[in-house]
Image (cartoon, grey):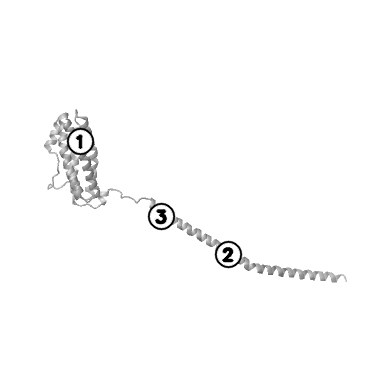
Amino acid sequence: MTMTPLTTTRADATHHETARAAVRTTRRRRRGPAALGLAIAATVLMTGCAGGATSTGDHSGHQMSGMTSSATPSPSGTGSAAAADAHNNADVMFAQMMLPHHEQAVQLSDIVLAKTGMKAEITALAKRIKAAQTPEIATMTSWLSAWNAPTTASMDHGMSGMVSAADVTALRDADGATAGTLFLTQMIGHHEGAVAMAKDQVTSGQNREAVALAQRVITSQSAEITEMKALQQAS
């Protein structure tokens, strides 16, 4: 009599547990598609966000590259621009003739600077001439070397304004006051010859550096001619 209720109770418990398990299985099956759908949606959303970030990053990278390119000045040529640029016979002739012309101007200036009793204005002028023309001598020498041309011109071409050997000797032998007067006279003619050659170069030359030097010669030496003529009148 006492065993029947116990057996019934265990059977009922087993039945109830089986029913609850079936309910849980049903609920999981119902939630499965929804959960899967949410997971897929989340994956798509994350992928879209990541793709958008990558695209934005790449675009930003291109923008920065463009900004860097536009902000960076294009590199200028290095070394001797005259060696790289085209040149013609007029450029070569200008350098060949102006080179010894400048060398003589420096020579005359050195003679005056070695004198005593020279006017301060003439001494200052000689210093400026030497300071301006000495580096130009080096420049023109480098051009001719780059152009595979000799540093001396053909004897068929005369250099306008060059001072004769006798006049150079006279300047060297003169005393201070006389040397100052001779220097002004000789250097005016010398500068006038340089300006004439420089004008020919501006007209006929091709090399941009050589033409630019010729223009500087015209400007600077024309001003010095005016200065020297004023000093002559003041003497």
> Mark 1 or 2 closer to N-term?
2
Residue 158 numbered mark, or none: none
Q: Looking at the picture, which amino acid does disc 1 mark?
A: Glu
* Mark 1 surroundings: few (<14), some (14-19) or many (≥20) residues within 10 A: some
Q: x%, y% of residue 77?
A: 30, 50
Q: CA distance from mark 1 to mark 2?
A: 90 Å
| In-front residue for pair 211/75 | 211
- Which amino acid, by three-letter code, is at mark 3? Gly
The percent position of residue 96, horizontal first and vertical second, equals 18, 46
Q: Confirm or deny contact between disc 2 and disc 3 (CB under 8 A).
A: no
Residue 43 is situated, as x and y percent measured from the top left of the image, at 56, 63
Q: Secondary structure at mark 3?
A: helix
Q: Which residue is mark 2?
A: 41
Would you say residue 136 is visible in this rendering?
yes
| Residue at image mark 1 | 227
Residue 17 higher or lower than 71, as above or below:
below
Q: Residue at x 22, y 40 (%)?
A: 220
Q: Is residue 48 left or right of residue 96?
A: right
Residue under circle 3?
66
The mark that comes first in sequence, 2 or 3, is: 2
| Side of 202 where 1 appears, left or right | right
Q: CA distance from mark 2 to mark 3?
A: 37 Å
First-in-chain label (3 vs 1): 3
Q: CA distance from mark 3 to mark 1?
A: 54 Å
How many discs appear?
3
Which amino acid does the dot numbered 2 rest on?
Answer: Ala
**Helix, strand or loop status at disc 1:** helix
